[in-house]
Image (spheres, rainbow, N blue to C red):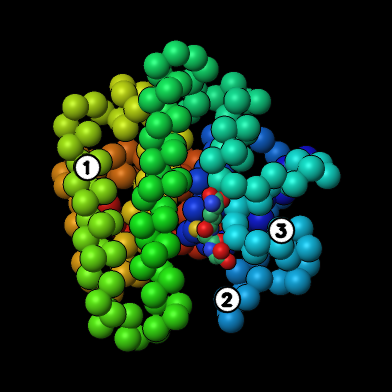
Amino acid sequence: MYTLYYSPGACSMAVHVALLEVGAKFELENVSTPDGKRPESYLKINPRGSVPTLKIDDFVLREGAAILTYLLETNNSPLMPTKGLERASALEWLAFANSTLHPAYSRAFFQHKVLGDKAAENPLYGPSIEAIQKLWDDIEQRLTKSEYLAGKNLTIADILVTVIANWSPMMKKPITFGPKTKALFNRVIARPSYQAALAKEQVTYKVAA
Ligand SMILES: N[C@@H](CCC(=O)N[C@@H](CS)C(=O)NCC(=O)O)C(=O)O
């Protein structure tokens, strides 16, 4: 039995979508609180406090990329190809989403957390947003060459970038998306799994055309 510990609209949403895509039976535990502190009960499971965490019976698995790879592989999902350059490309774009794009947003969120309303006045804030914009511009370039990030088929990387994009309206300076990128978001959010995850987490998707 799987239990996903999540926060609405966070990177854990990609795991939620993946669970629905593979048709797994799972339970959801929302660990967000009004004051932003994680419940003590969750910190006992994951002392880092971050989401996602997936409990697989009594086994605790953390780190989104590991959770997604495990889930898709064990359920033979085409969202994670099994071999060769197709797999290498899917892993490349999953790593990009998880370890390049996500941390770029985290740097801006950290400034929101520490500086509150004054974050946008911080000299580092503008460059943080420019760094995010550069990554979306890179994605747009990539999507002029292939329908999906890893090639001609949808992979989990497309789902994760679509989740991350929806954090953009929380930024205090604008982030824009090219037409190919928006078209990708529209294809991803049209999936029944994505719609079900949005509804369950009570999240509105704000950045598609
Ligand atoms: N490297 C971790 C990062 C997870 C992460 O930063 N999650 C965010 C939500 S998207 C979070 O929980 N932030 C609040 C916190 O760390 O307490 C992973 O990929 O699982």
The residues tagged by marks 2 and 3 sit, at their Cα atoms, a distance apart of 16 Å
The amino acid marked with disc number 2 is Gly
- Mark 1 sits on what residue? 138
Q: Quadrant of residue 176?
A: bottom left
Residue name at image x 39 percent, y 75 percent: 111
**Where is 204 relative to 76, above or below?**
below
Report the quarter where the N terminus lies.
top right
The residues tagged by marks 1 and 2 sit, at their Cα atoms, a distance apart of 32 Å
Foreground mark, 1 or 2? 1
Q: Earlier in the sequence, mark 1 or mark 2?
A: 2
Q: Earlier in the sequence, mark 2 or mark 3?
A: 2
Foreground mark, 2 or 3? 3
Q: Secondary structure at mark 1?
A: helix
- Mark 2 sits on what residue? 36
Q: Is residue 107 or residue 199 the one in the foreground?
A: 107
Residue 9 is left or right of residue 96, and the answer is right
Residue name at image x 50 percent, y 53 percent: 11
User: Disc number at residue 174?
Assistant: none
Q: Few, some or many C-alpha atoms within 10 Å of disc 1 (few <14, some 14-19, many ≥20)?
A: few
**Where is 32 relative to 65, above or below?**
below
**Where is 52 relative to 44, above or below?**
above
Outermost residue to the front: 123
The amino acid marked with disc number 3 is Asn
Outermost residue to the top: 84
Viewer can see residue 118: yes
User: Residue 80: x, y in percent?
Assistant: 50, 26
Residue 67 is left or right of residue 195, and the answer is right
- Mark 3 sits on what residue? 46
Viewer can see residue 209: no
